[in-house]
Amino acid sequence: MTEPRGAGVRPEASGPPAVEVESVCRRFEGHTALDRVSLTVREGEFFSMLGPSGCGKTTLLRILAGLDLPDEGTVRIGGVDAREIPAHRRPVNTVFQSYALFPHLTVRDNVAFGLRMKKVPPPELAERVARAMDLVQITALGDRKPAQISGGQKQRVALARALINEPQVLLLDEPLGALDLKLRKELQVELAALQKRLGMTFVYVTHDQEEALVMSDRIAVMRAGRIEQLDEARRLYERPRTRFVGQFLGSCNLLDAAVRERRGADLLVETGAGPLRLLTEAGGGEAERRGAFCVAIRPEKIRVRSAAESAGENRVPARVAQLIYIGSETHYVLTAGPLTLTAYALNAGSGAPAFGIGEGVVAELPAASLVVLED
Amino acid sequence: MAARIGEEVRFGERLTRARELARSAFTSGPGILWVVVFLITPLLAVGVISFLTRGPLAEITGPATLENYKRLLGFGLLGFDPLYPLIILRSLVLAAATTVVCIVAAFPIAFFIAALPDRFKNLALTLVIIPFWTNLLIRTYAWQILFAAESPLARGAAALHLIPNGGALYPGTFAVYVGMLCAFLPFLVLPLYTAVEKLDWSIAEAAADLGADGPRVFRHAVLPQVAPGLAAGIILVFVPATGTFVISDLLGGAKTVLLGNAIQQQFGPSRDWPFGSAGAFVGMAVVLAGLWLYARVAGERGAQELL
């Protein structure tokens, strides 16, 4: 392993480019897997490609690994055009979804494989293997065969086997996909911490939006072979640009809106739930030109208040249609005129719901939380 | 209705030991009987006969002796004579060489068939098996015609100065190997194809990703995965090939004696059953020793495959 660079310090996601993808296309018989995809991954960044199955994220990862080739476009790794570099000579390593451990080799020999291919002398090899196994805590498993260890342990072996080569970029293809939820959450945190400690560039493919949010510096949301939105994790969640991004990352209430008038920095719009005030900085200027558009708001941003309360802005009278108790939160399904709104309330107090089914309430949609979508 | 100790519950039915035994006897009995009557008993008879003596009228008589085995190992009446050890060695070399040639030919075929679209796979496999619909003797005689001096193949070879003008490709070593290859190739292709078909290519990709070039991907990621199929194929080719002599007789010019013809000679024209039996047993022992050695070299996994 490389020495931990600036341990504990979050590396800036603005370093020199580690991976540059320029208008890459990849077509398979009958469909286009990648359609003019461009992106740049910075050195030391935890970069995720997120999307439903078939969106092209794995194809792009395989192209970075050299296991597949683009029909058009260029890929540069560390500033070098990777077109003529076959998989076995690329300075990247992959953690495969199926782990793809060598079944006939012990855990130790699996980890040592890359160094053996590079003909690293035995003393150095033994030392580096020991360090890599220690790093992912599989030292005790050295003599076992892959068939004799659990899924979580296999995942660690696959990680050690890739990390030991000190790649410029580590590619991870849904490495936690086959694990149960609890283990997956533990490993997410561990993996993100490891990445920060090593300062290594990670390109991570997943279809799990929470996983992407937990671990990534930046996320590219992909859909049907294109990048729908590429942004920092927080911005992507708070400011989705399209319905797809809003609904793929968490839940989203969508309201069709029509511009009524402009009032200073605010935009007054008419929705099915009544008139709402928007802030023009949140894409309001462009929205005003379009006249009609879609507005999104996250369920946890909606405040459910008693009808008697008069505080708050953008108050929408509503009725509780359904109550879903999920432990930490209560989910309210509200009907407001022709619309259905979902609102999450934290069960901070006794946990007993503040409102009952059929009760009349007021849903407050704070202007700062309303996002104007582009589609 | 809990199962008592020593009982097993299977599909909701309680099996006592006696019932279980009765069931296995019913299902496996006929097969075991067949093996005992038609394989183990004759084999024991051959084993016993190999220690007896040929009488003056070619009858099998006493006394019990090791003479047959001594003769096979080269210690005859006239001092050491390597005739039979050489015959055994020649048979083994031919079988081993045939196996190697078959392996080299079977790999590309197995990969090619596995890469075909599904609807062509069965067709391709049928084409591999089709020669078996014709008797081995007829196929072998057919090579005599194809390799004769007037045949286009022989003329082509002569034109390329591979053989003298007007020469024939048969009889000769080349013809023998072509015949052996054609007779045994399917036995290697079929098990190897089964293994290639199941190949996990992501492991090969992992090897490439970790810095292995083409040959090393094959050695470290592909070969270990197809090893069981390869082992089965090697055994299916090597074992019968040690006993085959028809092909070398018909295509080699009947000049060389192999273990197969030597044994046939004893049971047929020479009417020396005890010596023929000893030959059969030595042949079996040599093959078993060869397989044991192979298992040792191929390691634990290979041994498991063999058993």
Image (cartoon, helix red, strand yellow):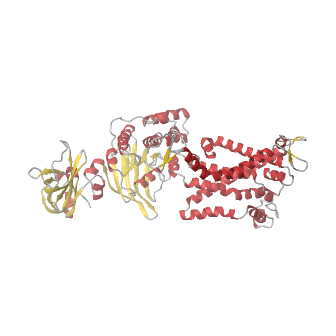
Q: Is residue A322 above or below residue A103?
A: below
Q: Is residue B163 left or right of residue B4?
A: right
Q: Is residue A279 left or right of residue B160?
A: left
Query: In the depicted view, which residue is nearer to us: B37 or B194?
Result: B37
Q: Position of residue B188 (x, y in %)?
A: 65, 54
| Count of numbered marks | 0
Query: In the depicted view, which residue is nearer to us: B237 or B76?
Result: B76
Q: Position of residue B191 (x, y in %)?
A: 61, 54
Q: Position of residue B181 (x, y in %)?
A: 71, 57
Quarter occupied by the C terminus of chain A: bottom left
Query: In the depicted view, which residue is nearer to us: A67 or A348?
Result: A348
Q: Is residue B182 left or right of residue A136?
A: right
**Residue B89 in sight here:** no
Examine the image and state in which quarter residue B75 appears. top right
Examine the image and state in which quarter residue B173 appears. bottom right
Quarter occupied by the N terminus of chain A: top left
Q: Position of residue A243 (x, y in %)?
A: 27, 58
**Residue B231 in sight here:** yes
- Residue at x 56% of width, y 39% of height: A119
Query: In the depicted view, which residue is nearer to us: B284 or B97?
Result: B284
- Residue at x 82% of width, y 64% of height: B166
Examine the image and state in which quarter residue A13 appears. top left
Q: Is residue B100 above or below residue A163?
A: below
